[in-house]
Amino acid sequence: MNIDKELLSIKINIATLIKMYDAIRNIVPIFTEDVVMYPYVNQVKDFIINNETTEAR
């Protein structure tokens, strides 16, 4: 039964990871040429600071 709880936790963490990846991917464009990354890094930093996950609590 303990293994089931661990597997459920892993699935939740993967689901959260996918949601965060998708959100960050919406902030940072696909690289087609060299660009200044500083604005995107700041936006991702702000996103991470302002969006908590349930796992982080």
Image: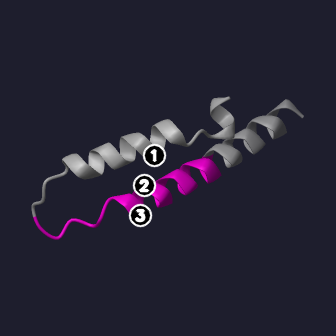
The image shows residue 10, relative to residue 33, as above or below, that is: above
Q: Earlier in the sequence, mark 2 or mark 1?
A: 2
Task: Assign the N terminus to one quadrant of the image.
Answer: top right
Check contact, mark 2 vs mark 3: CB within 8 A.
Answer: yes
Q: Which residue is mark 1?
A: 47
Q: Earlier in the sequence, mark 3 or mark 1?
A: 3
Check contact, mark 2 vs mark 1: CB within 8 A.
Answer: yes
Q: Which residue is mark 2?
A: 24
Residue 45: give x, y in percent of width and height.
38, 40
Q: Is residue 18 magenta?
A: yes
The answer to whether 7 appears left or right of 46 in the picture is right
Indicate the quadrant where residue 28 lies: bottom left
In the image, the segment drawn in magenta is 14-33
Q: Secondary structure at mark 1?
A: helix
Residue 41: give x, y in percent of width and height.
28, 45
Q: Amino acid at mark 1?
A: Phe
Q: Secondary structure at mark 3?
A: helix
Question: What residue is rendered at 45% in x and 46% in y?
Answer: 47
Q: Secondary structure at mark 2?
A: helix
Q: Report, in whole angstroms, how far the alpha carbon at label 2 lies from the one at label 1.
A: 8 Å
Question: What residue is rendered at 59% in x and 38% in y?
Answer: 52
Q: Of discs 2 and 1, which sits in the foreground?
A: 1
Q: Which residue is mark 3?
A: 26
Q: Main secondary structure of the magenta part?
A: helix
Depth check, front residue: 52 or 13: 52
Q: Residues within 10 Å of mark 3 (few under 14, many from 20)?
A: few
Q: Amino acid at mark 2?
A: Ile
Residue 48: give x, y in percent of width and height.
47, 40
Task: Assign the C terminus to one quadrant of the image.
Answer: top right
Q: Is residue 28 magenta?
A: yes
